[in-house]
């Protein structure tokens, strides 16, 4: 059966809100609009994508040279087909929108199933997983606590001698975070009180001295977890995702082995393959477990920073490299934001000249490639820069 893909980057915020009529912030709507064609880089062959019709000849020529054929469809056209729906993630507002657009409810997850997904997506699971992994392996670092009252949070912070980060139980990866430097402020206390009232608790973690961000990506189905690949990524000081290294798994392992034993990484992979189906027995789909290499007395692995129960940019980068980048080349995959009108188009024009694109046998040897059409009003871009090795 053919599949229809949807890029809905507001998913985590909508799932946390859990309202059928949730309105995402403008930034989430804009990234969804600008990058609506993103699924063409990771979707299965001959799939369809709910997006605007691509009318950019330069972009069309590039994807054609890479052997990509896809069909853009509207919401109502998608509703009239029997294809399987593959969103970035499921949430109540997406379900309601699809029903309003004519999708039969029986084709979609029930509200009970989406409620279970919200429970699975809670950071409370990452707190528990980290504790269990540390009990199993002496070489892991990191602390994470789930508190259900403001009194517990304030007591913890008062007893801590380091900076900390507070996290919403449900929010986007890299979002819903508050950094506590020395003492919690009145504004931060109010934030904490509101999150506990709305989501039932707050996660608190001491700040670590991070060296590298990375992740292990898995696929869960029928009570079994399969390892898909590594994600070696970068994030801003705030924790927001900025981009991925485009490297094969063995090259990522080699980079990580500068700080951690490969045997430790392999053991961690095995432990997660066993534990993930136990944590999420009714889940079917991708799971990304974010991790860090941190500086302590020696470099150590923080094995469970986040657990992402949906498609994610690390998986997009992994799939893009595997399908479209020549094995002997490597590069970066970046999500970028340009505030002023025309800035993205100017950046695009400069990089086309600076890094000419070279494609051989439907694979990129080197050069700059925009992964979404760029126009004057584009703010968000996804792009790759590939280098010969």
Image (cartoon, rainbow, N blue to C red):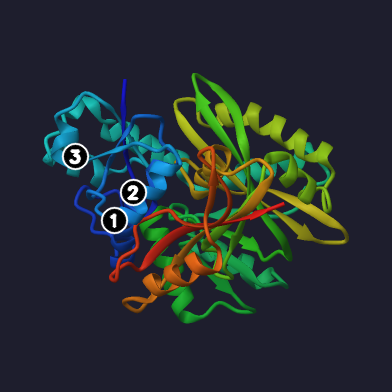
The residue positioned 24% from the left and 50% from the top of the image is 19
The residue located at (37%, 42%) in the rendering is 89
- Real-space Cα distance between discs 1 and 2? 6 Å
The quadrant the N terminus occupies is: top left
Picture residue at 26% right of the left edge, 50% below the top: 54
Q: Classify 211 as above or below 40.
A: below
- Residue at 23% from the left image edge and 40% from the top image edge: 95
Residue tagged 3: 98
Q: Is residue 197 left or right of residue 151?
A: left
Q: Position of residue 57 (x, y in %)?
A: 30, 54
Mark 1 or 3, which is nearer the eye? 1
Which element carries disc 2, helix, strand or loop? Answer: helix
Q: Helix, strand or loop at disc 3? A: helix
Q: Position of residue 213 (x, y in %)?
A: 66, 56
Residue that mark 2 sits on: 60
Which residue position is annotated with label 1? 56
The foreground one among 248 and 57 is 57
- Whole-number angstrom distance, CA of label 2 to CA of label 3: 28 Å
Q: In this image, 222 relative to 230: left or right?
A: left
Crowd band around label 2 with a 10 angstrom C-alpha radius: few (<14), some (14–19), many (20+): some
- Looking at the image, is mark 1 or mark 3 earlier in the sequence? 1
The answer, for residue 162, to whether it is visible in the render is: yes
């Amino acid at each position: 059966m053919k599949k229809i893909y949807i890029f809905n980057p507001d998913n985590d915020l909508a799932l946390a809100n859990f309202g059928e009529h949730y309105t995402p912030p403008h930034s989430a709507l804009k990234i969804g609009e600008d990058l609506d064609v993103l699924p063409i880089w990771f979707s299965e062959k001959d799939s369809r994508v709910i997006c605007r019709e691509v009318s950019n000849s330069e972009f069309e020529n590039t994807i054609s040279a890479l052997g990509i054929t896809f069909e853009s469809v509207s919401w109502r056209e998608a509703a009239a087909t029997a294809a399987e729906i593959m969103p970035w993630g499921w949430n109540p507002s997406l379900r309601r929108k699809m029903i309003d657009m004519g999708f039969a409810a029986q084709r979609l997850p029930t509200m009970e199933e989406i409620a279970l997904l919200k429970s699975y997506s809670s950071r409370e699971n990452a707190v528990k997983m980290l504790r269990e992994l540390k009990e199993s392996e002496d070489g892991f670092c990191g602390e994470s606590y789930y508190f259900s009252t403001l009194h517990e949070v304030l007591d913890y912070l008062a007893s801590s001698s380091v900076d900390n980060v507070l996290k919403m139980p449900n929010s986007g990866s890299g979002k819903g975070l508050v950094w506590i430097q020395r003492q919690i402020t009145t504004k931060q206390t109010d934030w904490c009180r509101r999150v506990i009232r709305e989501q039932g608790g707050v996660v608190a973690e001491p700040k670590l001295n991070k060296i590298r961000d990375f992740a292990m990506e898995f696929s869960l189905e029928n009570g079994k977890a399969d390892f898909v690949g590594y994600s070696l990524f970068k994030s801003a000081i705030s924790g927001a995702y900025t981009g991925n290294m485009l490297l094969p798994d063995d090259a990522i392992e080699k980079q990580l082995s500068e700080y951690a034993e490969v045997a430790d990484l392999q053991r961690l992979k095995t432990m997660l393959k066993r534990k993930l189906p136990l944590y999420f027995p009714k889940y079917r789909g991708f799971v990304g477990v974010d991790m860090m290499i941190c500086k302590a007395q020696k470099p150590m692995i923080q094995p469970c920073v986040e657990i992402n129960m949906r498609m994610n940019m690390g998986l997009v980068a992994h799939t893009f490299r595997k399908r479209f980048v020549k094995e002997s080349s490597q590069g970066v995959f970046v999500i970028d934001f340009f505030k002023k009108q025309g800035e993205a188009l100017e950046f695009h024009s400069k990089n086309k000249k600076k890094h000419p694109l070279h494609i051989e046998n439907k694979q990129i040897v080197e050069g700059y490639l925009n992964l979404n059409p760029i126009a004057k009003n584009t703010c968000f871009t996804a792009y790759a820069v590939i280098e010969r090795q």
